[in-house]
Amino acid sequence: MTSGKTVAIIGAGIVGVSTAIWLQRDGHSVTLIDREGPAAGASHGNGGVLASCAIIPVTVPGLIWKAPKMLLDPNQPLFLKWGYLPRLMPWLMRYLGTANDKDMRHRAAALANIIGDSLADHQALAAGTGAERWLVPSDYLYLYKNRASYDADALGWSVRKDHGFEWDLLEGQALRDYEPAYGPQNGFAARLHDHGRISDPGAYVKALAAHAQNQGVRFVKAAVDDIAKEGGRVTGIRAGGDLIPCDTVVVATGAWSGPLATKLGLKAPLETERGYHLELWDPSVMPRSPVMVASGKFVATPMEGRLRLAGVVEFGGLTAPPSRAPFKLLERNIRTAIPGITWKKSVEWMGHRPSMADSIPVIGEVPGISGAYAAFGHDHVGLTGGPKTGRIIAQLISGRQPNMDLTPYAPARFAPSA
């Protein structure tokens, strides 16, 4: 092990904070830098599920034919700001080009190694930090109208089975006995055990960050302008008009990682999936476990004092204001799934998921620059895969080889010679 590195981590979401904790535990000097603060983006607004089984990408076979119809249907969870389409097209063509069986299975195998043990990964990360209080082991339910709707997802379930996931099926009265919240129009479910949820994702990540600072991690609130290099090695970070000396840097800024990746010589095909959530505070009905409602492709997760609905995808870049239609769709969907549900108030949020064109995160050392590492691009599974990603980066920086093949995630696949 090579100890005593001086590490600057850019980004204080779950990936950056996890990396900071594991590096601090390894004895490194760590500075965590973020322009807003811990959990300011998707690490606050995510669906809150430790979705170990979520190894199937959005780009399933046949998506290229379904997507246009979805965009024109206001009841489908896919939206586009049409003025952004010309800028989106190069990335979108690469993205849709992976909507085939081979690429889907490749992505599933890569993600299984990052998120397949998410509950255990979070428990190891949070141990002794005080953040454990928000970590809740739970089942994860996939809810369908009927058995035929479940059977229509056979490809995804077969891929999950290939990676060791197991589930049981609940139908009719058995489903109502387990979860009476949902109406009779949803009469079938697949129940996966050994998953988990975070009862307040923002508070959880902030508590982890506070623990890291209490253990000696330095936090700097500033926007990073550049990464200083000399002789092919990292020498510092330029942030807020200051130079922060370091010999190692980790880019973990989620959907904002593209410009910094470019400064490191990576042509990473990164785009934002604008995600929406709607929180229902003091709902009249609270499900017992998080659920993916297959008919609406949205997640409903019980949290402290509220039910959070999430799962909509919109393409529209990093600067456009939120759209109204996704919030309205989430409300329509929950009223359909839980007839008669009421709540005292609702809270809306829109944020940015970092999505790679091949749906595989970028994790590892950047080629050609000593001391530069990338950890971004987790699309819908950033919370789920953050602790494992942070541990992998810490192991690499500490000179230890993780017990897994890192080739699928390698930044080298986006280097100019790739």
Image (cartoon, grey):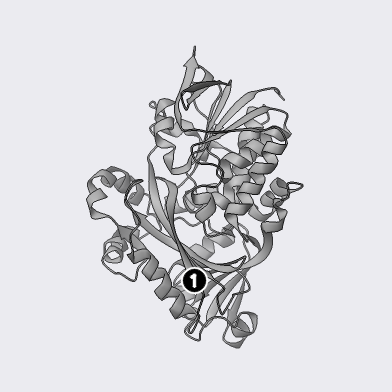
SS category of the residue bearing label 1 = strand
Residue lying farthest top?
Answer: 231
The spot of residue 371 in percent (x, y) is 56, 23
Along the line of sight, the residue nearer the viewer: 78 or 205: 205
State the count of labels.
1
Q: Quadrant of the C terminus?
A: top left
Along the line of sight, the residue nearer the viewer: 417 or 287: 287
Q: Residue at x 49, y 13 (%)?
A: 230
Along the line of sight, the residue nearer the viewer: 340 or 361: 340
Q: Would residue 27 be seen by someone viewing this image from the given angle? A: yes
The spot of residue 299 in percent (x, y) is 50, 66
User: Is 227 placed above or below 41 here?
Assistant: above
Q: Which residue is drawn at 58% across and 62% down?
A: 161
Residue bearing the label numbered 1: 345
Q: In which quarter of the image is the N terminus?
A: top right
Residue lying farthest front?
Answer: 344
Q: Would residue 193 be seen by someone viewing this image from the given angle? A: no
Circle 1 residues within 10 Å: few <14, some 14–19, many ≥20 = few
The spot of residue 22 in percent (x, y) is 68, 37
User: Is 183 placed above or below 89 here?
Assistant: below
User: Is 344 placed above or below 375 here?
Assistant: below
Q: Which residue is drawn at 51% across and 24% down?
A: 237
Looking at the picture, which amino acid does disc 1 mark?
Lys
Which image quadrant for residue 373? top right
The spot of residue 92 in percent (x, y) is 31, 48
In the drawing, does residue 157 fall left or right of residue 98? Answer: right
